[in-house]
Amino acid sequence: MAEKSMFDHPSNFRNRELSWMEFNQRILGEARDKQNPLFERMKFLSITASNLDEFFMVRIASLKDMVNAGYLKKDISGMTPQEQLDVLYKKTHEFTEKQYSTLNRSLVPKLREAGLEFIRYEDATDQEEEYLEAYFHKNVYPVLTPMAIDSSRPFPLIQNKTLNIAALIAHKDKGEEKEYDIATVQVPSVLSRLIVLPKQENGVTRVILLENLIEHFLDELFLNHEILCSGAYRIMRNADLSIDEDDAEDLLKEIEKQLKKRQWGEVIKFEYEEKMDKRLVKYMKKQLKVHSDDMYAISGPLDLTFLMKCYGLKGFGEYKEKPYVPQINQELRADGDIFEQIRKGDVLLHHPYESFDPIIAFIRQAAEDENVLAIKQTLYRVSGNSPIISALAQAAENGKQVTVLVELKARFDEENNINWAKKLEKAGCHVIYGLVGLKTHCKIALVVRRESDGIRRYVHLGTGNYNDSTAKLYTDTGMFTCKDAYGEDATAVFNMLSGYSEPARWNRLLVAPIWMKKRFLELIQRETENAKAGKEAHIIAKCNSLCDKKIILALYDASAAGVKIDLIVRGICCLVAGKPGVSDNIHVRSIVGSFLEHARIFSFYNDGHEEIYMGSADWMPRNLDRRVEIVFPVEDEKLKTKARHILDMQLEDTLKAHCLMPDGSYQKVDKRGKVLLEAQKQFCVEAMKENKKQESIPKRRFEPGKAPEHPFN
């Protein structure tokens, strides 16, 4: 049995859920930061809302399940599930109030000054009323389904995350009795929630929300009844799927069945307009079986994700960041022969600063190349009309051996992935659904090609999903190589995923859940031993989340030995930074900017022989113990320099970096005496300069013929 660490005490760890709330607070901080362009602030507020939705459906839901099951085990910070819920109820209510304070007191007045005005029906001009009445009867009324609730019509199923309107209605013929019934109507999600009114002469854009329009015309849905009062509401259900994979004969069918159950999950949050009549609130509370702690009276429009639609409105360019166009990496051009370029040497791409197009071209050219024998790839999340899926299907139709692992258990993408899996199978691809009990989260693509000197394997390894849409929004890295050691490991990965083959050793790759954590602990221990021996020792780790207890304890040991540790952790961080005697040498920062930080990069000084790794895994138990993940070494010196530059630049960020304090709070960097630097913008500038410097060099063009049409259209 391993010796217990002297640092293994609850006071040396932060609660995971509270740390996540701090992360969402940092995003809300960007919405409140007046230095940011107005529409960017609106976008950040929208992101806090979508983040909070998922937090409730998964994390709060999970805690509630534990409480209901009588689970009393404490987390690493020493809190039981009930204790966590008690703190989170307070935190989430406070956070919601802060969201709407930001909207109502800061953003709405500023947006009005900028020429964007949110109105209610009663604020409409005569001309606007005429427009709205016609719009309602033509576009909205035919779609609505009013539902009265009485002895013969029970309370209906209210679907997860849908917007609804509840009303008290009284029959007009009942005279003074005023007995009332309850009614509800769902705001159709198939219609745009944002209704843009005809442009004003003064150039102001006025918008009204769909639920407000429906509420105004509610009496037309319940003829011969009087609407006594009404109000919008929304519920959140437990969306954490419970799948018994061992007993599931067909994983695809089992997940399809569980997805349907999501709509019946326990109600874990009830949001309603603050103005809603108390009788309605009381009735809804009883019908939905919600606790008072799960009820949120909202002082504004429900579901602030509609603000992302507002961000897309035309004519407000001066209030937004100038759109950035990903640059071409001249060492790997999508319009050149991908395979020839990779043979010249390993290439590292940094997205979204550099274009994602070479990754699409890699699969497309492989699909068309008569010398390509096989393509193997993992898919976790892909875009709605994925060019990579199209190319894989085309490759199968061209007679290539195509193997695709589609992870059906990718949360909230299950349905999308099921559809892609079925279509890929129909095109002739061999589709694997993942391993029992594990999610396959690694990002790897392998192309096997016959060449004059024999079979050669081309490999792409990445930190992010093969998703051309999110590649423009998420910061990720990916490496192309055709070195034999990586090719052998890539083949071993796919043999492990498709069969029962477990390699005796790996040449280069660190693979979870069996080998990776052990190797990370060894790398941290090596720095610890070097520090004890009086040598310079330094660890830099960039990841999305850090909450694995063994990793944290190893970092504490390293800090105590004198290792300098710089952590760039975007979201959850359960480590306590800067605590005397525990983590004096550990500094943690989080960067929240225009792009979502997503890359995982790890640097170990190794007595001057620095080792740098990249990959798909965060330092979390789920990544290290319950997922198939890949972390790979960056060995080419030029690529190592590029990777280290990414880390150094983020450690120097003084504008978007937030530093973790010993009490668990985050503070912006003290800018006094420092150069003002925003790493993300600097990467954009550098990518544009590098592209401009290289674009004059003539490149050999690749002419693959007409790009394959999407076979599923």
Image (tube, rainbow, N blue to C red):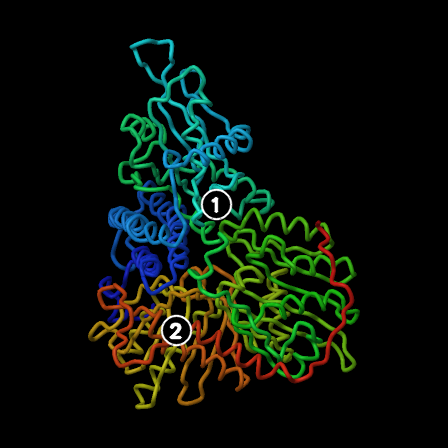
Q: How far, Cα to Cα, is label 2 from label 1? A: 37 Å
Residue at 22 percent across and 65 percent down: it is 663
Of the pair 613 and 381, the residue shown nearer to us? 381
Q: Which image quadrant for residue 605?
A: bottom left
Residue 634 location (% of width, % of height): 52, 79
| In the image, farthest residue toward the front | 201
Which residue type does callout 1 highlight?
Answer: Lys
Labels 2, 1: front one: 1
Residue 375 location (% of width, % of height): 69, 65
Give the side of residue 224 with respect to residue 440, left or right. left
The residue under label 2 is 678
* Above or below, comparing residue 628 to residue 459 in the picture: above
Of the pair 289 and 382, the residue shown nearer to us? 382
Which residue type does callout 2 highlight?
Answer: Glu
Of the pair 11 and 136, the residue shown nearer to us? 136
Label 1 crowding class (10 Å Cα cut-off): few <14, some 14-19, many 20+? few
Q: Which image quadrant for residue 495?
A: bottom right
In the rendered image, the quadrant that contains the N terminus is bottom left
Residue at 62 percent across and 77 percent down: it is 481
Residue 21 location (% of width, % of height): 31, 56
* Above or below, comparing residue 187 to residue 327 in the picture: above
The residue under label 1 is 199
Asked if one can make out residue 81 in the rendered structure from this viewpoint, the answer is no
Query: Which SS class for mark 1?
Result: loop
| In the image, farthest residue toward the left | 580
Q: Say which mark, if any, is on residue 300.
A: none
Of the two numbered discs 2 and 1 on the same chain, state the one appearing first in sequence.
1
Give the side of residue 101 with respect to residue 391, left or right. left
Of the pair 37 and 390, the residue shown nearer to us? 37
